[in-house]
Amino acid sequence: MKSMHKYLVFFISIILFVLPFTWYPQGELDMGGDSARLWLYSPMEYLRSTSLYTVDPIGTARVSANQYFIPHLLFLEGVSRIFGSTSVLVGMEKGLKLSLSFLFVYLLVRDVLVELSKKRKTDVAIESSAFVSGVWYALSGSVTVNMPAALLTHNQVFLNPMMAYLLFRFFLSQNPIYTWIALFVSVLYAPNFSLSAPPQLFAFYPLSVLYIIVVISVILKRSISGRRMIVPLLLFVSLHAFHLIPEVANVTNPGSELYGRAFNAGSDAMGYFNAILGLGKVSLYLLLPPVSASYAWTSVIPVFIMIIGFITTERKRLLQVTGVFFLLTLFLVSANITGLGVAIYRKLFLIPGFGMFRNFIGQWQFVYAFFYAVLFGFGLHGIFGRLKPRTTISITVICFALIIVQNWQFLNGSIANIRHQGADVRISVIMDPQYERMLGLIRRLPEDGKILNLPFTDFYFQLLGGVNKGAYIGPSTIAYLTGRNDFVGYQNMNPFPELFMEFSKKKDYISILRLLGLLNIRYIFHNSDPNIYDARFSGFPYGYMRTALPATQTEYSDFISALNAKMIHEIGPYRLYELPTYTPLFSVSDSIFIYRSPKADWHGLDSSILTDPGRSIHTTYLEKSVCINAGLPFLSCDENTSHVVSSATVAYTKISPVRYRVSVNMKDKRVILTFANQYNAVWELRDVSNHTINSSHFPVNGYANAWAVAPGEYEVEMVTQRYVTLGFWISLIGGVGFGIQGMYLMFRAWYNKRYEK
Amino acid sequence: MVFRECILCSVRGTINAMKNSMVVVKKHYQRILGFIRSNKSLVLGLLFAGVLGDIFYIPASSDVRFFGLIGIYALGTRWYRLTSKVTFIICLALLGVMYVLFLTTSTSVRTERAAVWLVLFWIAGVIQQWREIK
């Protein structure tokens, strides 16, 4: 009987892993969504554009530390090379989630119950309850509903139970093999252990580790050695140093993307919480009804079993402890449990950092599903423990059949037929070979100049048709697959999107050119495929942009013609244009205009600032208070004044996206050198001749970096990149130690086995 | 002298009257307590009716009702020596109510109210069970 259970678990794990491979036709990729899942298309291109340097490949190139991608993308690249296709990654991504989430919930429930049993042996009741809870978890909404267009952190659905199980085994046995495996997996899935996704990290691990400690020390009455945790913790920090060190450096940098995410810069956490509070439905989370409405009646069964379990179980302490964690996470995921509960929840936002849980439903649902499954398993065991084995098996079969039937559509591959919001177009695509050729051409473009990607969208999404009539909607494929910064939507063009819309509405093409010049835009990419704009996508994701920008693809072509852009490449519907004039990445403008803004940036400024026909297209715009604070003696900081600068030439060499060699030649003693990447204090300009750092670093043009410089040779470098190097070396040393530990553990296991024989 | 006697008499009278009334109140209290203790089903029935009334007939949510009724129930569990089993049976009844409301009205105000009651009784049950096996 025992071995039959093992075979069954193995069989189900394999089935769950293999199933997603049958959902998509060969070559089809589900790679859209909020997060750029373009790593499924080309892990190495994605790695090159995002993870090697602490700078974003999109828009104005924000400072961003994405090194956590490196081991995961290398792992995906390795898999895709072994199988000779990247489409295998789509099946593997989903298959691992289903299979491992089932397996580790099963193992956790089983092992806890085995440890509590008198004989310390498994039996039908234990195996059956663990099996049902595992299947329930693997096919629960937290795994299945979030699967299409999933964020990378969605891997937490299997990582959570896996880590909980490995920690449980380690605490019990003190065998370092468990922490070794946990560390190895944590490096492969480093995005789930990075500070860039703190909610999922801080939602699960504190609660689950506490739960495991309570289960072991209070219920199993075993001691936990804290000293044994020191080596794994040190190894964790050193192995993850390659992304943790740059992240820590960036989390303290107010201009970085990570700072904004961690401290909610520009957003009111409490306000957001209040706005979505009404969505927290206690009944919905208690019942967790299946997606298929016709099986909503089955949703009562798990809760019913849990409550019955409290009455019938012989392991009351286990159910109580699990129940406490279950009810706590129910409170956290639903928020609406009495007025007092809501008031307490609001007070939690006073804790620094708790603001990351403002989207409480999204952040706590995975932890809740985990405790739900575990409590369901223990509740079932409370019932099964009082039944005859034959009855237990019959109920297990019924439960299994019910879970399968209510998720039949999902298991049958309905996920591959999901349509885009408001359009009858599938989300999975087969990449157009013509577009792939265009990407190749874009990669070979001269280094300087960013790209405007049209049709322009409301968010930061690009829309791209596939040869299977599906469409990709997600972050820019040009940015993430070629490493060329492009502007694809409203959110990329900060702080100018409203001006761009206004000028477009007024057909003021000179001002548009001036605006594009400020952003270092040299090329326009136009996807003229009518299927991605005209009729099929009349609303999302273009709704707001259509109010000002061209309404059809034909009008977009006219719009580009009016900008006097010259077509340099055309492959099928994909056209690449070059603008008649642009401002290079490093420039010394021919005039400087002083303006005044209450926020010392571009927001809320009148559009007339760019429309003055008397002003040169290469003008640099400097805010009055910034001008005063920068201490520029060669400039008067009077409002609305223009300064004409004598001719100067700037030449630069790109050493890497975070390091440039710049040469400035001009007659004037000092001028303003503009660097058209997003302003951040971590960009440093150093005089090559005497290695002194230029301290007059200030923002211009509402977003860009600028320095007051004299003629000479300079090096511009992003200093946070040094932390990447430092972290890499620490991780390398940690990796060597980790490898040695792994070999020692293997040798010890081999030796013990031999000795026992 | 007579005046003083009169005052003393009236004070004594008041004290006696108060004593008598205290005795009466105590008797009433004991009688009420006795009544409550001897009518477990009625009291619990009323309490459960209060919960159902809150779910079905009172549109506005109130913490006073939530915590008042659950507080009375907590006292009831001591008076009547109710086990956690009873509390979990009440949970099952509330689950039934919530389930039917969910199937018929989705996540309506009533469904949510029933869900909150279920959670409160569940918490009460866990605490009660914890104390039982201490």
Image (cartoon, rainbow, N blue to C red):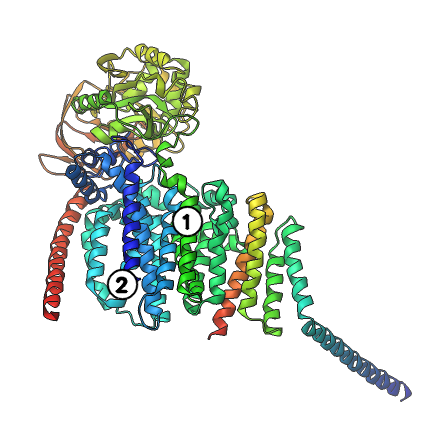
Point out the residue furthest to the right here. B2
The amino acid marked with disc number 1 is Ala
Chain letter of the residue carrying label 1 = A
> Where's residue A200, x and y in %?
34, 49
CA neighbours of label 1 inside 10 A, class few (<14), some (14 to 19), many (20+)? few
Query: Quick check: A624 left or right of B38?
Result: left
> Where's residue A446, x and y in %?
16, 22
Where is the N terminus of chain A found, in terms of image quarters?
bottom left
* Image: A507 above or below A168: above
> Where's residue A23, x and y in %?
31, 36
* Pointer 1 residue: A401
Query: Quick check: A229 left or right of A691?
Result: right
**Nearer to me, A741 or A241:** A741
Where is the C terminus of chain A found, in terms of image quarters?
bottom left
The amino acid marked with disc number 2 is Arg
* Image: A14 above or below A1: above
**Nearer to me, A552 or B103:** B103
Chain letter of the residue carrying label 2 = A
Nearest to N terminus: mark 1 or mark 2: 2
Is any atom of residue A256 visible in this view? no
Q: How far apart are marks 1 and 2 (CA)?
A: 31 Å
Q: Is disc 2 placed on a helix, strand or loop?
A: helix
* Image: A305 above or below B108: below
Q: Is disc 1 placed on a helix, strand or loop?
A: helix
Is any atom of residue B63 visible in this view? yes
Q: Residue at x 27, y 53 (%)?
A: A10
Query: Quick check: A751 left or right of A18?
Result: left
Point out the residue furthest to the bottom here. B1
**Nearer to me, A221 or A691:** A221
CA neighbours of label 2 inside 10 A, class few (<14), some (14 to 19), many (20+)? many
* Pointer 2 residue: A169
